């Protein structure tokens, strides 16, 4: 069995955690960092995890992709708001059979990537994980961790359970990363949106955690209305999400501990919001397919307003060189 | 010409200003007060106005409608959030031909009133005025002042320019209060909603003044979307609001000085929001007429959430005795 080399693009809550697990399991891992570069180069990575804390005293840290070696697998763990940088970041890391794994929320990233990297397998990964970066090179993994993987297919049809998926899953399993393989990336991504659209969006607009949202009967109703629009969006691409899935999401969220969504955390930190991945791209895709989703458009418009106000106060950038 | 007696229910920015002008012009005016009662009874009312400041050293002040005399005209200048009190407040003030003038925003108040006071003329008044209460018994009138008056008609048809309207307009004119008479209360109220729905609602949800809202292209678009839904609501009642009216509202708002809407001011002060008058009632009426207005529903649901959070912090009440 080959021991694949991994490049981790974005060493934060997601990339730092999963990349750390891969290195701990013996894989060769190369980490791209931005603000934490100097710190991590000297001090390595500290991962506190409910499954066991560990420290990687020596990591291959870079602040420039030109200095990184091409790898067998490139894991993209940036926020989608940075995806415009990928056309610069990825090419130096690719060799003939490099696979790209996108650990990101929302819709549209695989399609975007396939435009300029048409000859490499692209795999979408949806992380169900509570993980935060709590300091430079310091990740705290609180709960969960499973990644649902599905391969991108340029014709919009399900790619099936491919050999590429199995290869990645085997590596991840070796690193104690649980995976679920799914044959249909598009269905998988729309299903995730059933939760992400209402809760990420409304938590920012109404400045509330999931429990506060669900305790209000009007917002519980609005969340369900929004979920139904996501289901209508999926249907425009021939993907059926049953009603029982909506009920499960509502019940599950009601019973969860109070939770601040990733978009709410980004908002509170003054970071750009993943509005385009979670709302803009699905809306534009659905519109092209002839489906209008008025509440989702309204949520998008409201979030764009907040995002503009937010980034006016605290602009952020990533070092691309 | 008879000199009518007036009862003013709610002596705030609206009731204090217009009631003050009526008393200054020589009308017998009786003011119902709540928190300012003791102060105004001793010190009277001070009105600073761009049209000339004046002080009423002696006013007929009450904190209990039982002590007030029946009057020829009862002016309701409460916030609509207090309208549930009207069945207790109004009957002691009525004699055979008493007319009721509702200086309030939104929809549904005349219909509500007509249920328990079916035999008195009810006139709706829409104030286009910038006026604030700045201290006990102290009103500051900043700009504008015209009131559009239209009479309620139980059959839902335009009442026309009635003799009742002319009588009120003559009194108001004598008190330097400009009026516009309109034959169709329902059309008048829906037209006012074209502005009130987007700007009152979004200013609260997005914590912004009118200029901040209009400076964002997404929100300008959303405001227009919401206006079109209001127009669709009016159409369900056979009332036509032309496209050019929407364009006028958008242009006008873009050119206005930054303005905090009344609902935003209520929100900032921790007062209950006029969500039912401005959104809930129009939505339920439109729904009964078979028209669904998804963005307005979403705005309603969001505002109900904010209103609950708001009133949890700072409950307010009016003394009904």
Image: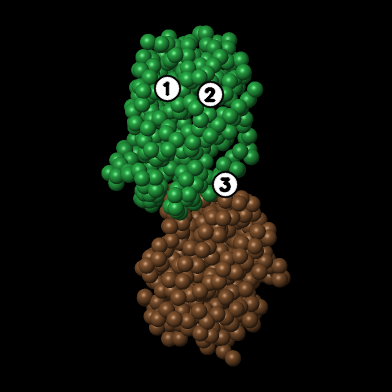
Chain colours: A brown, B green
Task: Identify whether A252 is placed above or below A173.
Answer: above
Question: Counting residues from the N terminus, which is met first, the one under dot 2 or under dot 3?
Answer: 2
**SS of the residue at dot 1?**
strand
For label 3, the residue is: B305
* Quarter that holds the N terminus of chain A: bottom right
Can residue A61 be seen?
A: no
Task: Identify whether B229 is placed above or below A131.
Answer: above
Residue placed most toward the observer, A65 or A22: A22
**SS of the residue at dot 3?**
helix
- Circle 2 residues within 10 Å: few <14, some 14–19, many ≥20: many
For label 1, the residue is: B141
Residue placed most toward the observer, B246 or B290: B290
Q: Which mark is residue B10?
A: 2
Q: Are marks 2 and 1 in contact (CB under 8 Å)?
A: no
Q: Are marks 2 and 3 in contact (CB under 8 Å)?
A: no
| Coordinates of residue A87 in the picture (x, y in percent) | 39, 71
- Circle 1 residues within 10 Å: few <14, some 14–19, many ≥20: many
- Circle 3 residues within 10 Å: few <14, some 14–19, many ≥20: many
In this image, A208 relative to B128: left or right? right
| Coordinates of residue A228 in the picture (x, y in percent) | 51, 63
Q: CA distance from mark 1 to mark 3?
A: 32 Å
Q: Residue at x 66, y 69 (%)?
A: A144
Q: Which mark is residue B46?
A: none
Q: Residue at x 44, y 53 (%)?
A: B290
Mark 2 and mark 3 on one chain: yes
Chain to which mark 2 belongs: B
Question: Counting residues from the N terminus, which is met first, the one under dot 1 or under dot 3?
Answer: 1
Mark 1 and mark 3 on one chain: yes
Residue placed most toward the observer, A199 or A51: A199
| Coordinates of residue B120 in the picture (x, y in percent) | 48, 26
* Quarter that holds the C terminus of chain A: bottom left
């Amino acid at each position: 069995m080959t021991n694949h080399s991994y490049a981790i693009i974005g060493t934060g809550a997601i990339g730092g955690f999963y990349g750390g697990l891969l290195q701990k399991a013996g894989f060769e891992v190369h980490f791209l960092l931005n603000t934490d570069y100097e710190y991590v180069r000297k001090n390595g990575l500290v991962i506190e995890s409910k499954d066991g804390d560990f420290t990687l005293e020596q990591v291959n840290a870079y602040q420039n992709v030109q200095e990184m070696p091409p790898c067998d697998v490139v894991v993209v763990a940036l926020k989608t708001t940075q995806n415009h940088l990928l056309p610069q970041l990825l090419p130096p890391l690719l060799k003939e059979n490099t696979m790209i794994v996108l650990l990101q929320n929302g819709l549209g990233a695989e399609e975007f990537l396939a435009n300029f990297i048409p000859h490499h397998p692209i795999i979408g990964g949806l992380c169900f994980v509570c993980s935060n970066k709590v300091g430079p090179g310091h990740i705290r993994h609180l709960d969960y961790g499973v990644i649902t993987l599905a391969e991108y297919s340029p014709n919009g049809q399900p790619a099936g359970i491919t050999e590429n998926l199995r290869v990645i899953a085997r590596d991840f399993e070796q690193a104690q990363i649980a995976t679920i393989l799914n044959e249909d990336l598009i269905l998988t991504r729309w299903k995730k949106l059933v939760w992400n659209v209402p809760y990420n969006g409304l938590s920012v607009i109404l400045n509330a955690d999931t429990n506060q949202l669900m305790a209000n009967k009007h917002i519980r109703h609005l969340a369900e209305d929004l979920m139904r629009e996501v289901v209508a969006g999926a249907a425009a691409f021939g993907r059926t999400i049953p009603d029982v899935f909506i009920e499960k999401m509502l019940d599950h969220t009601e019973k969860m501990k109070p939770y601040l969504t990733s978009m709410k955390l980004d908002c509170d930190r003054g970071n750009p919001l993943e509005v385009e991945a979670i709302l803009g791209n699905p809306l534009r895709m659905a519109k092209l397919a002839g489906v209008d989703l008025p509440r989702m458009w309204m949520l998008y418009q409201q979030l764009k307003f907040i995002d503009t106000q937010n980034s006016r106060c605290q602009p952020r950038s990533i070092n691309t060189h």
